[in-house]
Image: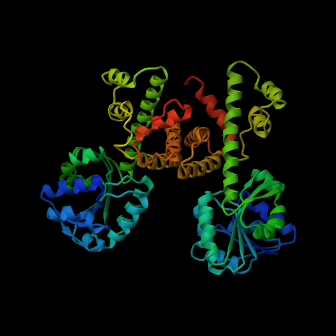
Amino acid sequence: MNIGFIGFGTMGLSMAEHLIKAGHALRVWSRRVASADSLVALGALRCDWVHELAMGSEIVCTNLTGSADVAGLADALRPGLAPGAIHIDFSTIAPGAARAIAAKHAAVGVEFVDAPVSGGGVGARNASLAIMWGGREELAPRLAPIFSVLGKSAVRIGEAGAGQVAKACNQMILVNLIQACAEAAALAAAAGLDFRLVREAMLGGSAGSRALDVFGGRMAIRDFGAGVEARLHHKDYALLMDEAARVGAPLPIAAAVWQQLNALMAQGLGTRDTSSLLRVLEGATGRHTD
Amino acid sequence: MNVGFIGLGLMGRPMALHLEKAGHALHLWARRPESLAPFASVNAKTYATPAQVAANADVVITMVADAPDVENVCLGADGLAAAGKPGLIVVDMSTINPNAARSIGQRLAEKGIEFVDAPVSGGETGAINAALTIMVGGTPAAFEKVKPLLEKMGKSVTLIGGSGAGQVAKACNQILTGVGVMAVAEAFNFAAKSGVDAAKVREALLGGFAYSKVLENHGQRMLDRNFKPGFKAWMHQKDLRIVMEEAHRMGLMLPSAAATAQVFNAIVGSGMGENDSITALQLLEKMSTPEA
């Protein structure tokens, strides 16, 4: 299949590689030309213009950062896409922004699928992402050959925008749990305990979770450098809480966690891992200094 | 003075009429023509676009729902900026995001139009009685020019600072009233569930350190079970959403406001958004009663 791909951050680069290796003809465009060099070496065709990429693609994949980036790029792609072409956006953006793009595409017969992913850089590299998508159900057979080489699961949630709502739920559960781990670590330390042991004991029980394993692990060894930049989770909470206000859904715990993330940002920890939520708690009591 | 007025709803209508009574000539545009009906018998001209209002006015006041509306009226096609003379002052009395106000102000300044943000507190009653509290952001020179107009609509008019500062003050006001209403509702629900008369509690507390206007006024309306607006809960939800957006943008921890905003989400989600914001008490009561 002729597939266009735009957006080569850590995630996008791995995903594009998988598509090439699965035998798809990949057309690439990037704002910084060099960021697609490794893909061109693997056989991807470099396009000089977004329009050129759109013209030759049955499916275009985008993987960017913010709602405005995706909306702007969608406007640039639209005139070149043939009726029936599919634009799959893997970015995490506001559900409302995804719905708006879908409506503008639909007006010219172009399909839009929001397909945010969970699993991070490791999941992208291992093709083990969890993909949650929103879009017309009839598109499923055309999406399957792509999703199957990128992830270990792809679930259709509903119409356009639904994938982003699912992703917002995903981020909320994850970061709320990271905050719970941080609170457990702070409580254990205040009681004079070694959180490494507390975590180890809990991992096998009912409170065991990926968050406790991965982020709790970083807290246990006080390695706040690697992993997910907290500012990205902070951004996700703006999308989540805005959607909650729009539909009138009370999210009391998420709202409290959001404020801890705000404090984290204010303390200049935005480029550190989200396990830094522990340091925000410690800052409130001055109990621990690295 | 030739005063343009756009946004003739519950608040805007009485505010505009105060200005007309004070001898100013009104120049009006409304999205819905029926909003213009109350002005048929007064000194007011109506126009087909905001641009035409701007062409005929020295000062234009806007009182609309949210930032995109202000932006449209000011900078959209046929907006104020399309025909405003250099030196025109636009006074936005809506409650919008402070950052959005700064941005609109900047873009109007590029066209030689001065922008003043002047959101109000006091609700419909305050608008009808010309007793609003008006919080102003803008240059001192522009403030001095529009102050006589604002004084016809409010009893307290304060220049807080530069562009956006009025909206920041309004956001602070909404934090205090939102969290304040919740605090009073929680205290009253706590008293009632403990078998104690909340009215007696209020009476006793009014003389003490916990005294507040919210305890006195909103508290009395809670005791009277008068949930008619006043200030509608969905508007308070909107205002708290602005507060939380700004807190997010700045990286600012507002734990109490965040919790309160979620209660207002629940109020709107359960269809009680048209009630006064003291309907928060009803939500707490519902949450502390066994399911039917």
Q: Nearer the viewer, residue A109 or B94?
A: B94
Q: In which quarter of the image is residue B151?
A: bottom right
Q: In this view, does A62 lie above or below A245?
A: below
Query: Looking at this rendering, what residue extends furthest in the front direction?
Result: A290
Q: Can residue B49 be seen in this view?
A: no
Q: Quadrant of residue A276?
A: top left
User: What is the quadrant of residue B24 in the picture?
Assistant: bottom right
Residue drawn at x 59%, y 69% is B72
Q: Is residue A233 left or right of residue A26?
A: right
Residue B17 location, x and y as percent?
81, 65
Most extreme residue toward the right, as rendered? B22
Q: Is residue A214 left or right of residue B92?
A: left
Q: Residue at x 71, y 18 (%)?
A: B195
Vertical placement of residue B126 versus A110, above or below? above
State whether residue B21 appears in this view: yes
Q: How is the image coloured?
A: rainbow
Where in the figure is residue A233, as x and y percent of width and height?
A: 42, 46
Q: Quadrant of the C terminus of chain A?
A: top left
Q: Is residue B96 left or right of residue A132?
A: right
Percent of width and height locating residue B4: 74, 72
Q: In this view, does A270 lie above or below B24?
A: above
Q: What residue is shown at x 48% (from left), y 34% (from top)?
A: A289
Query: Is residue A11 left or right of B93 when viewed as pictured?
Result: left
Q: Tell me the quarter of the image containing the N terminus of chain A.
A: bottom left
Numbered marks: total: 0
Observer-nearest of A42 and A159: A42
Q: Position of residue B155 (x, y in %)?
A: 84, 55
Instruction: Residue at 63% x, 73% y: name it.
Output: B108
- The residue nearer to you, when weighing A230 against A223, is A223
